[in-house]
Amino acid sequence: MNIDLTDTTSSQINSSLVKARRAAGSPAVGMVLTLIIVTDEGNHYDALKSASQASQEHPSRILVVIKRPGRSPRDRKLARLDAEVRVGGETGTSETVLLRLHGELAHHAHSVVLPLLLPDTPVVVWWPEDAPAHPNEDLLGKLAARRITDASATEDPVSTLALRAETYTPGDTDLAWTRITPWRSVLAAALDQRHAPVESAVVEGEAYNPSSELLALWLADRLKVPVARKVSAGPGLTAVRLTTGEGEICLHRADGSLAALKMPGQPDRHVALQRRETSELIAEELRRLDPDEAYAATVRFGAGRLGKQTIQPETVNGARSAPAAGAPAAGRTPPEPEPAKPSAPAHRALEAPRPAPPGPAGSAGSAGSAGSSGPPSPPPPPPGARPLEGVRPQPPRKDPGDPGGPAGRQAP
């Protein structure tokens, strides 16, 4: 059922939604979230189609915000809201509302959207193109628990990823990261079967492909090895090569659908790595609405490393950390190096060693301590002293005041 509303208000749109649900025979609301799509007139059809397909897995109220500020000064002074309500039919159990904001109202989209949000449900905002520089500071972005962007839809994906790293806030994500989920899963499973440490890696993909950049950053961050970035003819990501002490692990996808996994000492295997549609990517992002910690760690690690031919891992005290000997599975943290034993203070190291008084053989004060492999070396003589030859060490003399000494011994 479709209801067209011209020069309307948010209250009239809510009334039309209730009327459409009753006419469709489903007065109850069974939707789990509100999905806001911010787009323009030329791209709203494809974005709405992808969101409608994703809503089959996640029933939701889809609000498509189409801003039309106008070109002439007269059009920019107008403030009109046109809406189209769709319930049932292709939308299934979801609801779709197209909001066309004309003139000055285009700069106040949050005031129109706020009364239309489902109560007590999470809100997700998706910018298919032309996302704001700071999604978390956008007025619509502040309403959402999850903010989805797409760096591959921009003119300079690498600069966009660098901006996402600088402005990251928990809840941000990018479809360029979602596209490499199958690659990360296959690589993590492959390295779980090998125990040899990874020495280096190579990621091959199309030029200006943000997914290739993110995959290379993820490998460098998790494996702590240098990762080279090579440009190929595509489509998209084409290969990942990991060099280990036992040989090379290669995951190669030439046609964009079927990949070959080659591992040392094992037969080649074929893995389904088909390039997914936007609807599948949106459906994946809607499965979990908590912050993506793996994406956050990757974009923060990539700050200052994006666009480089070879991505170097983090260094400790000027030396590269040792390569990891396992899979870079999500959530796995590489073992921390053991802390170095504290060295002796400078003033103690400069003091002359004091010779210990000799004791009887087998006592606690002789031969250094238990566990020594041989007799202890004698202390060095003081400067200017001549070594004494043929002098035997004398037993310690008793103190005259000691009861065991001569003065304290009673007469028989």
Image (tube, rainbow, N blue to C red):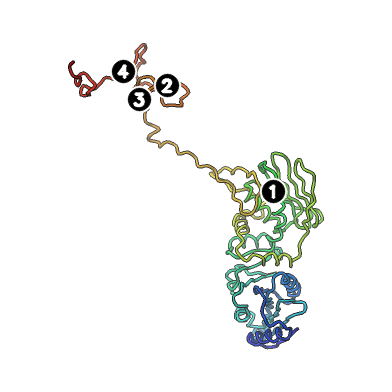
Mark 3 and mark 1: span between their CA atoms? 60 Å
Give the residue at x 64% y 71%.
Answer: 124
Question: x, y percentage for residue 15?
Answer: 66, 87
The amino acid beneath tag 1 is Ala
Which quadrant is home to the N terminus?
bottom right
- Which residue in the structure is indicated by mark 4? 395
Question: x, y percentage for residue 214?
Answer: 67, 56
Earlier residue among tags 3 and 4: 3
Earlier residue among tags 1 and 2: 1
Q: Which mark is residue 356?
A: 3
Circle 1 residues within 10 Å: few <14, some 14–19, many ≥20? many
Question: x, y percentage for residue 16?
Answer: 68, 86
The amino acid beneath tag 2 is Ser
Count of numbered circles in the view: 4
The amino acid beneath tag 3 is Ala
Whether tag 1 and tag 2 are in contact, CB under 8 A, the answer is no
Earlier residue among tags 2 and 3: 3
Mark 1 and mark 4: span between their CA atoms? 72 Å
Give the residue at x 67% y 42%.
Answer: 195
Q: Residue furthest left?
A: 411
- Nearer to us: label 3 or label 4: 4
Q: Is residue 254 visible?
A: yes
Mark 3 and mark 4: span between their CA atoms? 13 Å
SS type, badge 4:
loop
Earlier residue among tags 3 and 1: 1
The amino acid beneath tag 4 is Pro
Earlier residue among tags 1 and 4: 1
